[in-house]
Amino acid sequence: MIESITLNLDQSFGDLKECVLVTDAERTIVFVNKAMETLFRVDRADLIGSQTKRFFADPSQFEQMADLYRGPSEKQHKLTHTIDLVLGDRSKTTVEVVSAPLFNAERDVSGILFIARDISERKALENKLSDIALTLEDALDAILEGFAIFDADDRLVLCNDNYRDIYAHSAPAMFLGNRFEDILKFGLGKDQYDTGDLPQEQWFSERLKWHQQADGKVLEQKLRDGRWIRISETRTRTGGIAGIRADITELKEARAQAESAYKNLSLIADNVSASITETDRDGNCLFINKTGCRWFNESPEELLGTRLRDRLPWKEREIIRTVFQNALEGNKVTHEARFSFPDGVSRECFLEANPRLNESGEVDGLVVLVTDITDRKKTERTLAELYAITSTRELGHEDKIAEILRLGCEHFDLPFGLISHVIDEHYTITHAQSPNGELVPGTSFDLKDTYCTVALSADEPIATSNAADLAICQTPLLRHLCPGKLHRRSIAGRRCRPWDDQLFCA
């Protein structure tokens, strides 16, 4: 122990949660407590007798600390030093250090006591918060909408320039800490709002109530100068209110024109099985038919004025964005792609984007027709595979029959497929496709106990999607395929050729 130090360091600092280190006048480590040993990630025995220089990431910091050993200085030892360290496992961390001189009997500095605190996590958090704050400022300046945040006491915390521009008459009242109620009242006094048929006091009360609800619903507000503003306000996690303001004047005008121009057309469009939409140059929806609403799983009121592609996965948004960009140049653009719609259905679609020209011949929007071609594409793939099966020389006759049965089951989404031979009143399975081998070629049934009595008596293919409703379908064959209670079952069948008694069923 350093001469003139009478305290028992281990008893005093050994179990202290703060990291403690003591050096002698030569800057050699003479004591570390358990917390410091853990911080350095080096055994105490390897620390005692070594110099602290080994842990400094920046050697110049080690040199600067030498001033502490050159004589007592109250000012120096009151300072907090931030030091970057290289630990025993070569990882790095940052610590805050305060120091106190130790004296011998002659009042000379015989060592320094250091107390350190690991601040690497705090420093990383501060950097992260700083980055977030800068990002937020950049985002607020970049967005086209007006944006404002009020705290839990409904006092203004921040707003961007677009917010002030939208409510130019109220801008002088938009200073930090001012209440929303006072800002609203200031604008009302400047005749900024069109209150319609409502007295100012009633309009003020209803608008303030809407603001305080902050339930995310959209409010369209008309200003005295004729502009329309779309307002959306939502509660923050801390109890404040975040609000977005967007000037939708052009959208309102376009919507009125669209409602007038397409009143009769909408009646026709609603009876078309394809999705029909009309958008402005920014992709905002001006019109959408019932099919489109059903695919996007929203009402027309919820979809109008929004970008429909924003409801799709990002890869599909990129496809539509490229198609729209080309169409806005004045070209009719077509494209085939698969889209996953908000109604939960993935559809293969044929998309047509047609430029809409204004009186000056400029493109001011698009009319978009999206047709569901899923069944057609499925049929094309099935026919292509059927051709490949029938034309290949790699498969024998029996293998081709098996592949065709498999293909038929896949195309109709049915688990079982079979070809049977009927002689007199005997029904025998000759070829079968089943998931678990339930159908075995050679198995026979009485013809009357099969669904195929219906198929044999028909002159064309027949099918049912609800076999449970047909008494004749409660047969031993079907109970063999579907043990237990027969619920909704799909069955299709036909003669392979009209002049024989061979059947294909699925």
Image: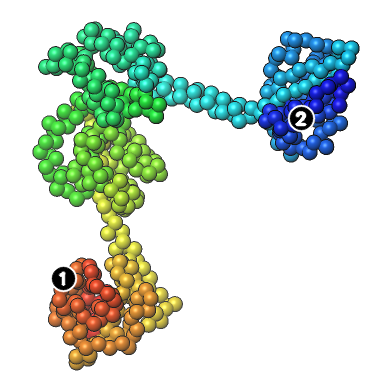
Give residue 469's mark: 1
Instruction: Give the residue type at disc 2.
Output: Gln
Residue 164 against residue 378 in the figure, above or below = above
User: What is the image's colouring?
Assistant: rainbow
Residue 21 against residue 293 in the figure, above or below = above
What's the residue at 59%, 27% (across, down)? 122
What's the residue at 18%, 17% (across, down)? 203
Q: Is residue 120 left or right of residue 432?
A: right
Give residue 344's mark: none
Q: Is residue 29 left or right of residue 210?
A: right
Q: Nearer the viewer, mark 2 or mark 1?
A: 2
Q: Is residue 150 left or right of residue 453?
A: right
The answer to whether residue 83 is visible is no
Residue 105 horizontal/vertical position (percent):
88, 14
Instruction: Give the residue type at disc 1.
Output: Asp
* Nearer the observer, 430 or 111: 111
